[in-house]
Image (cartoon, helix red, strand yellow):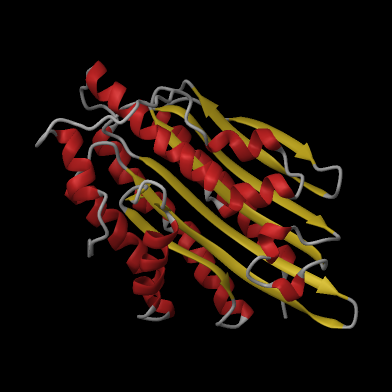
Amino acid sequence: MTDTQAVKNYLLSLQAKIVAALEAADGHQFISDSWERPDGGGGISRVIEEGHVFERGGVNFSHVMGNNLPPSAAASRPELAGRKWEAMGVSLVLHPRNPYAPTVHMNVRFFTTHAEGKDAVWWFGGGMDLTPYYGFEEDARHFHQTCKDALTPFGSDLHPRFKKWCDEYFYLKHRKEARGVGGIFYDDFNELDFAQSFAMTRTVGDAFIPAYLPVLEKRKELSYSERERDFQAYRRGRYVEFNLVFDRGTHFGLQSGGRTESILMSMPPVVKWRYNWTPETDSAEAQLTNHFLVHREWV
């Protein structure tokens, strides 16, 4: 039996806990922006811009519902098309100003559908992934190890599966290039019972702070020049391309009439594109593509 209120309570507490940790790291406060969705539900957007550490960041909670499941959500489950649905989750993207501090994304979510005379169909989804501009082996290993440690109590097979899923999902097919160094990703997950699936998702959400904050603390004050900022802006273009072209959450939010400002808060504030540009051979910029943006086992 599902308990949507327990899920909602956890997600709200997770948002508050993460925002408090990030405010302590930055020294500036997030603004809080509550909103309502005309078709049902609403959310709380917590956003920081032009902070000491974060050029832009958002930690969003949403709880929305509707009468007809949108196409992006029903794509893999066509038998659910047209059902009443309910979705809730916490989603965050952080874009630090320092090019040596990586962008990070995390999301945990719950989805359920209802139809008269039929059992509810529910699932959890989530994960986190790291997108560096200048790679550090120890950062990637720490991030992946923390993800693995979170999943292992629920089955030794989960981390290899979710790590591979992340590598395949956060991949720019038109570039034949990974978005970052990966992490974990899962969706439509209900193979454990509700209690265990919820417990696993809570563990993933709770793992974000220990996975990311140590990396951020090491890199946020490193010295950099305009060269590094310029490369960061160029690489951020890949982030924009992925979110607009491939990201399932972005598509679902826009198709379901979600709040555009909250959906697109994931976009970096300063971005550049260049025509057919390649970095100098053996440069730190070339190392990102050749050494870090390749699918490999970090732990």
Q: Nearer the viewer, residue 206 or 78?
A: 78
Q: Is residue 220 left or right of residue 20?
A: left
Assign the C terminus to one quadrant of the image. Answer: bottom left
- The reply to whether residue 150 is in sight is no
Residue 258, how many percent across, how many down?
Answer: 73, 44
Q: Is residue 290 left or right of residue 236?
A: left
Q: Nearer the viewer, residue 262 or 271?
A: 271
Q: Determine whether 80 is above or below 240 in the image.
A: below
Give the total number of marks visible in the rendering: 0
Residue 290, how many percent across, how many down?
Answer: 18, 47
- The reply to whether residue 63 is in sight is yes
Tell me the residue at 83%/57% (across/down): 66
The residue positioned farthest toward the front in the image shown: 276
Assign the N terminus to one quadrant of the image. Answer: bottom right
Quadrant for residue 197, please give it.
bottom right
Q: Nearer the viewer, residue 27 or 124?
A: 124
Tell me the residue at 22%/22% (across/down): 224
Q: Determine whether 267 is above or below 198 in the image.
A: above
Residue 291, how many percent across, how many down?
Answer: 17, 49
Residue 108, how many percent across, how many down?
Answer: 55, 58
Q: Nearer the viewer, residue 128 or 291?
A: 291
Tell me the residue at 84%/50% (across/down): 40
The residue positioned farthest toward the top in the image shown: 226
Quadrant for residue 110, please give it.
bottom right
The residue positioned farthest toward the right in the image shown: 116
Q: Determine whether 156 is above or below 211 in the image.
A: below
